[in-house]
Image (cartoon, rainbow, N blue to C red):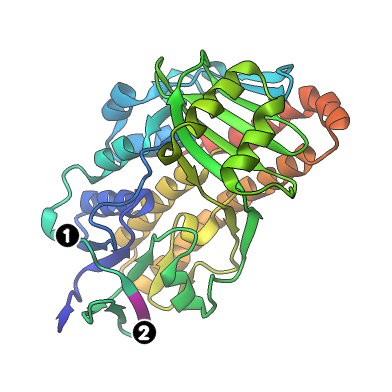
């Protein structure tokens, strides 16, 4: 069985990048269809950090009122040692200002905001893309159930392990794919009294706690140096034995609830090209980065805005894809470069890192985010 959607752009992936693009295309009156392999996109019930440029992008997508209502303000960042010594802090309110104040939000809530108002007929669930064939005038997608879809353009918004990237560039995981940390976890837990975005760093790993409200925190932890420990929970338990009581108490709460801990390897994607013929990549499929600056979602939202604008203003789709990539390259490269700089500093021996961070930390923060205040 086959269907033809020649007049619609096909977005593969109904997560944040795909839903944001659909919303941006709808605002430009451009036809689209989202293909999602799950009935609803998986989010693990977890949360995300939205720095100021993400807030700016959401405002451009018509969601300022919603994000101010449902997002939890993050007014400060703190960087601490494993022994809880404050290395430096950043007043995010002062840096971004009230209009672009960073916020935290549950991923499911953000997805609901982005998808609100999208026509039901534009959403195709339980559709697992297995193959893609690119032609000069169109692209064909083969689904697991035997269905074939034809479209003038395919957008891969299908994450780090993108099928569209594999099909477009011809390798198993795609060129530029790297595993940064095999042991990495996400979780939600009762708030132990954390009132701002806070990261604790030891030689062996890091823990981040970010309040979602007064009652709950989102947590992320990673082992940054190879260990001879056993399974993931054992390694996380071992790592946090040296951390402050509030961190340790939070992790123990999660370890006591096996279904509350989500293991997710930390992966990175860097490509020389994001488009090939009638296929283009956005979000993590194109440029997943380590979460040093929490820019993954922000960059995906910006991608959606820029791609929709290019498609609405340039008559020929192929030049529009080239224009999209040309507009986005320098901004993404900037985030990647500052991610590398902070990551390298974090890998220094603890006594050196702890001596340097009070000086280089605030500087790196300003260097990273100052250019991102400019709207895309």
- Quadrant of residue 54 within the rendered picture: top left
Q: How many labels does the image show?
A: 2
What x and y, as percent, mark residue 16? 36, 48
Res 50 visible: no
Residue shown at 79%/41% (left/top)? 347
Q: Is residue 15 shown left or right of residue 368?
A: left
Label drawn at residue 122: 1
Q: Under tag 2, what secondary structure?
A: strand
Which segment did they paint magenta? 130-135
Q: Residue 321 magenta-drawn?
A: no
Q: Is residue 228 shown left or right of residue 261?
A: right
- Quadrant of residue 292 within the rendered picture: top right
Q: Is residue 180 shown left or right of residue 252?
A: right
What x and y, as percent, mark residue 195? 51, 15
Distance of label 2 from label 1 (alpha carbons): 22 Å
Quarter of the picture holding the N terminus: bottom left
Which residue is more in the foreground, 48 or 101?
48
Residue shown at 55%/36% (left/top)? 220
- Count residues near mark 2 (Cα–Cα under 10 Å), then give few for <14, some for 14-19, many for 20+: some
Q: Is residue 273 above or below residue 329?
A: below
């Amino acid at each position: 069985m086959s269907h033809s959607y020649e007049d619609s752009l096909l977005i593969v992936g109904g997560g944040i990048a795909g839903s944001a693009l659909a919303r941006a295309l709808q605002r430009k009156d451009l036809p689209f269809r989202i293909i999602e392999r799950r009935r609803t996109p998986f989010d693990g019930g977890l949360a995300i950090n939205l720095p100021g440029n993400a807030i700016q992008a959401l405002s451009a997508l018509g969601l300022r009122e919603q994000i101010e209502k449902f997002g939890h303000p993050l007014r400060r960042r703190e960087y601490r040692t494993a022994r809880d010594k404050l290395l430096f802090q950043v007043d995010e309110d002062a840096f971004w200002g009230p209009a672009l104040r960073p916020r935290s939000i549950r991923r499911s809530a953000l997805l609901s905001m982005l998808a609100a108002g999208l026509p039901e007929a534009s959403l195709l669930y339980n559709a697992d893309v297995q193959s893609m064939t690119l032609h000069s005038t169109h692209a064909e997608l083969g689904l697991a159930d035997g269905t074939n879809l034809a479209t003038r353009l395919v957008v891969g918004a299908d994450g780090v392990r993108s099928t569209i990237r594999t099909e477009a560039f011809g390798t198993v995981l795609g060129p530029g794919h790297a595993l940064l940390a095999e042991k990495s976890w996400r979780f939600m837990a009762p708030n132990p009294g954390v009132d701002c975005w806070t990261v604790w760093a030891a030689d062996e790993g890091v823990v981040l706690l970010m309040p979602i409200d007064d009652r709950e925190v989102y947590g992320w932890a990673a082992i940054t140096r190879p260990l001879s420990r056993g399974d993931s929970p054992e390694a996380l338990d071992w790592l946090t034995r040296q951390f402050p009581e509030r961190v340790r108490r939070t992790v123990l709460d999660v370890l006591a609830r096996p279904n509350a801990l989500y293991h997710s390897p930390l992966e990175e994607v860097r490509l020389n090209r994001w488009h090939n013929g009638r296929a283009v990549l956005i979000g993590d499929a194109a440029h997943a980065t380590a979460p040093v600056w929490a820019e993954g979602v922000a960059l995906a939202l910006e991608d959606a805005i820029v791609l929709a604008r290019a498609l609405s203003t340039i008559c020929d789709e192929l030049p529009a894809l080239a224009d999209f990539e040309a507009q986005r390259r320098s901004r993404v490269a900037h985030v990647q470069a500052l991610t590398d700089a902070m990551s390298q500093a974090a890998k220094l021996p603890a006594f050196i890192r702890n001596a340097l961070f009070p000086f280089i930390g605030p500087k790196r923060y300003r260097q990273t985010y100052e250019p991102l205040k400019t709207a895309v």
